[in-house]
Amino acid sequence: MSPQPQQDFGDYLVFVDESGDHSLTRINPQHPVFVLAFVIIRKSDYIGTLCPELQHFKMRYWRHDEVVLHEHEIRKPQDAFSFLLRRPVRERFLEELTALMEAMPATIVAVLIDKPAFAAGPDDPATGVYDHAMKIGIDAVFRFLIEAGQAEQRTPVIVECRGRKEDRELELAFRRHCDVGGTHARPLPFDLVMVPKTSNSAGLQIADLVARPIGIAHLRPHQANRAFDIIRTRFYQSPAGEADGWGFHSIP
């Protein structure tokens, strides 16, 4: 007899990735922002749509699905992505990737921190940029889950490992926020799942593709940004259709 699934497992997965570093002592003037992106997807959509669509996409270009998509390597092609140096192939690749993102059955929560303004603002920078972004993002994700009727179900929050010290700090911060519950004043039913950077996780690859365009849209608002044009339609919204303060948080 096969084991019965635990009844408190939720219907969603949450994948988290970042863009930019979280140092406030050495701020890169070319990219002085930090973005933490949360991609929320129903498990049935993940295994039934996103994973197979991403596999088909990879098969068309690599004839296998072992390549891990990274926004940086697509933007600055090298190694397995060097074929993108050929303009016609690159344009076709980006068009197909854009179509995949447009059809993506996911909801996005993003926290963008303008680091110079944050360091000079009223919030205590000693809490740390990553810690602050995680607190706000987790709070918003749980608000989404309440609306989805998932407030009592266990939901995995999946992140990449960043190094032993950083991982330990992240786990402590994550547990601290979840145990207290932020504005919800109750423990939050999230399970932190940390996976190696080499993991071929479809959800983490999508989160990687999402994070940087959000930061670029803030830094260069008048620049064409088709990735962000798609992402903004996926932000978690209020009942009135507002993303600001719901699926998108710009700090300060």
Image (cartoon, helix red, strand yellow):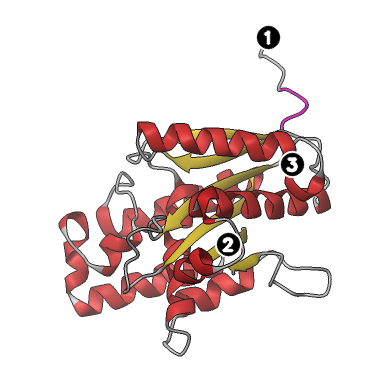
Kind of residue indicated by mark 3: Gly
Where residue 224 appears, as percent x and y from the top left, is 43, 86
**Nearest to N terminus: mark 2 or mark 1:** 1
The stretch of residues the image draws in magenta is 6-10
Q: Is residue 169 visible from the viewing direction of this image? A: yes
Give the residue displayed 51% in from the left and 57% down from the top. Answer: 36
N-term-proximal mark, 1 vs 3: 1
Which quarter of the rendered picture does the N terminus lie within? top right
Which of labels 2 and 3 is toward the front? 3
Residue at image point 57% right, 62% down: 111
Residue 40 shows which numbered tag?
none
Q: Do the residues labelled 2 and 1 touch (CB within 8 Å)?
A: no
Visible in this render: residue 101? no
Q: Mark 2 points at which residue?
A: 110
Relative vertical location of residue 39 with respect to residue 194 in this rendering, above or below = below
Give the amino acid at mark 2: Ala
Q: Which amino acid does label 1 sit on?
A: Met
Question: Closer to the observer: label 2 or label 1?
Answer: 2
Mark carried by residue 181: 3
Q: How far across and how far down the image is residue 45, in percent? A: 62, 50
Marks 2/3: CA–CA distance: 18 Å
Q: Residue furthest top?
A: 1
Which residue occupies 29% across, 65% down?
Answer: 74
